[in-house]
Image (tube, rainbow, N blue to C red):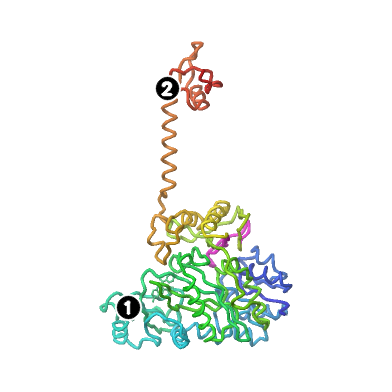
């Protein structure tokens, strides 16, 4: 088994990996930037090394600095987490060249899946359905027009080196193709240093369903069912769940088998995810992510599998701990991403010092966080502060639990996405599982900065109550039975203490307030 690991990441995922490693008796080595000195991942690791300034390019993205720490701390393995260097084939290669175990797939698999046209070719060859389109880059504007016409409008132009929605361009008619092709090519060149662009038919309002995969070095591949990730904003997921509320048992089996074929086609080892678009009962391969994903906990809760433990076991050369038919699917899990963004203010990135932090607990609740009280939230890294995950025997209870957990969660000092997530938990389409990637645009009231309907109704009730009290106060007695006048203040307190007598029944005015319910 592996006895020590460098965790080449920060935040909640670094902490998640450190926790998993510690449970397995693996010595953990953290790295941190100058901005992350007080981060929980630093405190939880056995050792921690500062690797430079806040700027990721000079710290978490520096292969040289990471390998220097790995050498100095004498670790056997490197876990990349997600983001940063996790899907850089050259990093996986450099780790292996330094004689260390990379906790992830081979560099060649990472490279193959990073090129979206190559991925499409390999998937088509393996019998995995792909969206109709090309699997070689477009040669010219006229090639783009010809291809788009044969694929059928609307189409989408995508960067071969892209992924995650970057550099996508939707085209609705032949007139726009040549212009869109030039723009897409220029954007891809400047964003990825590779101007290759290909075309797919554009599916409208698809659902985003992905399958969790695992492969070992002995040719075994299993899937761990699906995650529904349709609730997104600009390709950032907000809510994920497992299982998908709308997938049938047959759909689940077909998609799982297709994902396993996809993994076999690239000799996949370790944890991976195949993303599918799902529309009108059909599903199509979109991308393969060669890493652990942010939303992996929902899979852990419905299968009982510790995915980080499996990652270490597979990286150490062990065979997968379970066969496909041994992997259970039980209950329902939801994840909400708590980010430092102002959801009613166009998702403006929020900054501040976390001056209050209370995390929920109780049955079926998990908090995977990366923050602590006193931590400064800046703009250097992605805005994910932590994830709230709930499990319950069924989806309605998992939603109610999430609502409760979101109500218990308190993050002070920095704006978060939590208020929007609370609104989503209350929204009927979400509650009934009517999900699509267009969910947020189709529910503009949820992200509207003005007062939301439930809150507005509560304010109306409060206003009516105040008006009622004002009128009741006016009819409260001015003269006591002993003939002395009551001051305005006395009348207010009198009426405030007595809920019914004065206004409802003026003839009782003057009754001893302490006996006001006594109608005899
Ligand atoms: C698509 C698509 C419709 N048709 N491809 C966006 C992220 C990137 N991974 C691919 N994406 C899409 N590709 C075709 N042929 C719609 C999207 C898309 C989307 C996909 C998944 C989740 C959310 C999305 C939101 C908008 C667009």
Rendering coords of residue 430 (x, y %):
45, 59
Image quarter of residue 281: bottom left
Tag 2–tag 1 contact (CB < 8 Å): no
Image quarter of residue 170: bottom left
Rendering coords of residue 174 (x, y %):
26, 79
- For the point 33% across and 81% down, which residue is it? 182
Sooner in the amino-acid sequence: mark 2 or mark 1: 1
Callout 2 secondary element? helix
Rendering coords of residue 300 (x, y %):
60, 68
| Disc 1 Cβ-to-ligand 1 distance below 8 Å | no
Query: Residue 501 lies in magenta, yes or no?
Result: no
Horizontal side, residue 85 vs residue 455: left or right: right
Question: Is residue 190 placed above or below 345 in the rendered structure?
Answer: below
Image quarter of residue 15: bottom right
Residue at image mark 2: 475
- For the point 69% across and 70% down, which residue is it? 48
Locate the N terminus by quadrant.
Answer: bottom right
- For the point 61% across and 53% down, which residue is it? 358
Residue range in magenta is: 371-391
Rendering coords of residue 158 (x, y %):
39, 79
Mark 2, residues whose alpha carbon is within 10 Å: few (<14), some, or many (≥20)? some
Residue at image mark 1: 180
């Amino acid at each position: 088994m592996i006895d020590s690991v460098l965790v080449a990441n920060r935040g909640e995922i670094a902490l998640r990996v450190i926790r998993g490693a510690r449970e397995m008796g693996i010595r953990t080595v953290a790295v941190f930037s100058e901005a992350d000195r007080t981060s929980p991942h630093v405190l939880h690791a056995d050792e921690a090394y500062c690797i430079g300034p806040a700027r990721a390019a000079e710290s978490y993205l520096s292969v040289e600095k990471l390998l220097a720490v790995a050498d100095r701390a004498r670790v056997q393995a490197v876990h990349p987490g997600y983001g940063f260097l996790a899907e850089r084939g050259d990093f996986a290669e450099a780790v292996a060249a330094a004689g260390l175990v990379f906790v992830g797939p081979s560099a060649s698999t990472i490279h193959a899946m990073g090129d979206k046209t190559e991925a499409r070719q390999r998937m088509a060859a393996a019998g995995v359905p792909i969206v109709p389109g090309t699997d070689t880059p477009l040669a010219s504007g006229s090639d783009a027009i010809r291809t788009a016409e044969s694929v059928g409008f609307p189409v989408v132009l995508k960067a071969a080196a892209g992924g995650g929605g970057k550099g996508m361009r939707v085209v609705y008619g032949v007139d726009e193709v040549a212009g869109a092709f030039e723009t897409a090519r220029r954007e891809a060149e400047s964003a990825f240093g590779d101007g290759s662009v290909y075309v797919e038919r554009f599916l409208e309002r698809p659902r985003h369903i992905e399958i969790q995969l695992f492969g070992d070095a002995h040719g075994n591949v299993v899937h761990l069912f699906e995650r529904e990730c349709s609730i997104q904003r600009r390709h950032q997921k907000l809510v994920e769940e497992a299982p998908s509320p709308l997938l049938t048992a047959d759909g689940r089996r077909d998609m799982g088998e297709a994902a396993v074929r996809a993994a076999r086609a690239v000799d996949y080892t370790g944890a991976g995810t195949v993303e599918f678009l799902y529309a009108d009962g059909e599903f199509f391969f979109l991308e393969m992510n060669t890493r652990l994903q942010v939303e992996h906990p929902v899979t852990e809760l419905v299968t009982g599998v510790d995915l980080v433990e499996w990652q270490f076991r597979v990286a150490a050369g062990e065979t997968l701990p379970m066969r496909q038919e041994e992997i259970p699917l039980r209950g329902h899990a939801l994840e909400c991403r708590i980010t430092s963004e102002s959801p009613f203010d166009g998702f403006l990135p929020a900054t501040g010092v976390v001056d209050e932090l209370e995390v929920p607990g109780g049955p079926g609740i998990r908090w995977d966080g990366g923050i602590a009280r006193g931590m400064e939230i800046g703009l250097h890294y992605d805005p994910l502060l932590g994830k709230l995950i709930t499990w319950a025997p069924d989806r309605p209870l998992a939603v109610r639990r999430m609502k409760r957990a979101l109500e218990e969660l308190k993050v002070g000092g920095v704006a978060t996405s939590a208020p929007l997530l609370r609104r989503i938990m209350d929204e009927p389409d979400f509650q009934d599982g009517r999900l699509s990637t267009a969910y947020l645009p189709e529910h503009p009231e949820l992200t509207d900065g003005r007062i939301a309907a439930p809150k507005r109704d509560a304010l109306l009730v409060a206003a009516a109550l105040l008006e009622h009290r004002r009128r009741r106060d006016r009819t409260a007695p001015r003269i006591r039975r002993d003939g002395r006048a009551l001051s305005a203040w006395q009348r207010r307190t009198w009426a405030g203490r007595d809920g019914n007598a004065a206004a409802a029944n003026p003839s009782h005015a003057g009754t001893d307030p302490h006996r006001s319910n006594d109608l005899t």
